[in-house]
Amino acid sequence: MKEKAIAVVTNRKRMKEFLSLIDEAGFDVVGILYVRRITTGVLSDYKLKELKKIIEQSDGVSKIIFDLELRPRQAYRIAKETKIETMDRIQLILRIFLLHAPSQEAKLQIKLASLRYELARAKEKVRLAKMGEQPGFSGLGAYEVDIYYNEIKMRISKILERISEVRKRRSLHRAMRKKKGYKTISITGYTCSGKTTLFNLLTNSCEKVGEEPFTTLSTKFKLIKIGPWKVYLSDTIGFISDLPPFMIHAFRSTLEEISFSDLVILMIDGSDTIEEIATKFRTSYNLLIELGVINKPIVVAINKIDLIDEGKIEKIKEIIQERTPYVVPISARFGTNINELLRLIEQLLGEVLKARIFIPYSSALYSLIDLVKREGEVISIQNNSEGIAIEALIPNDFNEIVKKRVTAVGGFLEYD
C-alpha cells in the first residue's frame, strides 16, 4: 500500500512530470497545494494555514513533497508546523534512483549523490538538531558539527575510489573498442522518451521499458551492425530538468560514455506538448554540450509519431533544426522510419569504400573471409582455381587492417 502524500506545486508547467515522479517514488497524492510566490520560509503564513487544512481533510498523510529544493531550515519549519516529514525534489529523485538501481555501480553513484546532497546541508542540520527535537532530523544531535561533516566527506572519498576503479575499467573497454575500429553510438534523451524501446528494437533485446521515470540507471551496451559498420550501441540514463551539478557529477562515470561516442541519438517524446518538447530538448541538448559532446553528430529522433499528426511533427522540426539539421521522425514501438534513421546514421559515421579483394587458397583463407564479413559488408563471393574473389564495402577505418592481412598471404585489394 502506498504512503499518502501532499504535493506542493510551485511550477504548474512541470506539474505532470512532478506528479509522475511522486507516483513512481511510491506515494499516493491525496492533496495538492498550489504556491505562486516562494518566501524565505517557502510558504507564507496564509499558505501554511491552507496546507494544514489539506492535512486535516486527509487521513494518514506521511509526507509533504515539494517540487523544488529546500534548505534544511525551510524543511524544518514546515515539519515543525505540520508535524509531518517533508521531502524536496532532490530527495524524491534519489528515492526513485534507489528503487531502480540494477547494479553495484548504480548504487555507488546514488549513494555518492545522496552524500553530496547531505554534505551541503550538514552544518545547518546539526545546528537545528541542537535546538531540540525536530521531525525528520532524528539522530543528528549525537554528532558535533565537524565530526558529522568529516564523516560524510570520508564516506564520499571511499565511494569515489570505488567509482574510479569502475571508470578505469570503462576506459580500458573503450580503448579495446577503438583499437578494433568499432564505432560507439549513445541513445540519450529525457526520461520516458523511449530510449530503451529503441535500444531493444535495434538490438533485439528485452530490456525493461515503461512509462515510469528512470528505468535505466546503468549504461547498457550491445554490438550491432549498421551497414558496413560494427557499432556498440548504448542505452543511457534519462535526463531531467533542474538537476543540481552534484547529481550530474555523481553519475559522471555513466554519462561520460556519451562524450566518447562517435554519434549521439537524442530521443524526443513527440506526444508531449510543444512547450514541453522545447523545454526538454533544450535541457537535453545543453547537458550534452556540458558533457563535452561537441563536433560530433547529434541525430534527433522524434519518437511516438504514431500518436501525433504531420502538422505537429513539422512544428517540432522547427524547434530542433535551430540546433542540429539531423532530424528523423520515428515510432520505436512500431518500427516506423527506423530504416531512414539507420541510413542517416550510416551516412554520418563516415566514408565507406567499395573494394575488390582476391585471396589465394591458404590456411588463412577462411579467417580472412571472416575478417571481411566482420568488418565490412560482402556484396559477392566467387571461387576460381586460384582463390576467392570478394566484392565488399569496407569502412575506411578498416582499410589498412584488411589490406595488410590480405597482402600478407599474397592477395591483393583495390578500390573502385
Image (cartoon, rainbow, N blue to C red):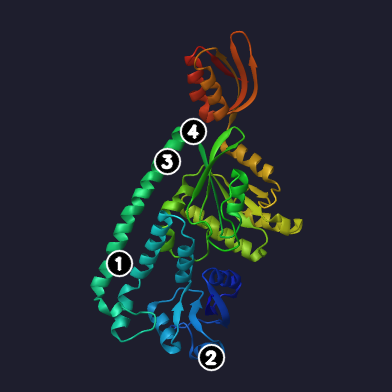
The first of marks 1 and 2 along the sequence is 2
Element at badge 3? helix
Q: Where is residue 237 in the image (x, y as percent from the top left)?
A: 51, 56
Q: Nearer the viewer, residue 309 or 292?
A: 309
Callout 1–callout 2 Cβ contact below 8 Å = no
Q: Which of 253 and 111 is in front in this view?
A: 111
Q: Residues within 10 Å of mark 4 (few under 14, many from 20)?
A: some
Q: Which of marks 3 and 4 is in front?
A: 3
Q: Residue at x 54, y 57 (%)?
A: 284
Q: Is residue 27 above or below residue 416?
A: below
Q: Distance between the residues labelled 1 and 2?
A: 38 Å
Say how many tags the image has: 4
Q: Which of marks 2 and 3 is in front?
A: 2
Q: Which residue is drawn at 38% across and 48% down?
A: 167
Q: Where is residue 181 in the image (x, y as percent from the top left)?
A: 49, 33
Q: Which residue is drawn at 43% across and 87% down?
A: 83
Tell me the quarter of the picture where residue 15 sits. Answer: bottom right
Residue pointed to by mark 3: 173
| Left or right for 339, reference 398 | right
The first of marks 1 and 3 along the sequence is 1
Type of the residue with mark 2: Glu
Type of the residue with mark 1: Ile
Residue pointed to by mark 1: 152
Q: Where is residue 210 in the image (x, y as percent from the top left)?
A: 60, 60
Q: Is residue 5 above or below residue 191?
A: below
Residue pointed to by mark 2: 56
The first of marks 3 and 4 along the sequence is 3
Tell me the quarter of the picture where residue 160 sits. Answer: bottom left
Residue pointed to by mark 4: 181
Q: How crowded is mark 2: few (under 14 residues within 10 Å), some or many (20 or more)?
A: few
Tell me the quarter of the picture where residue 270 sits. Answer: bottom right
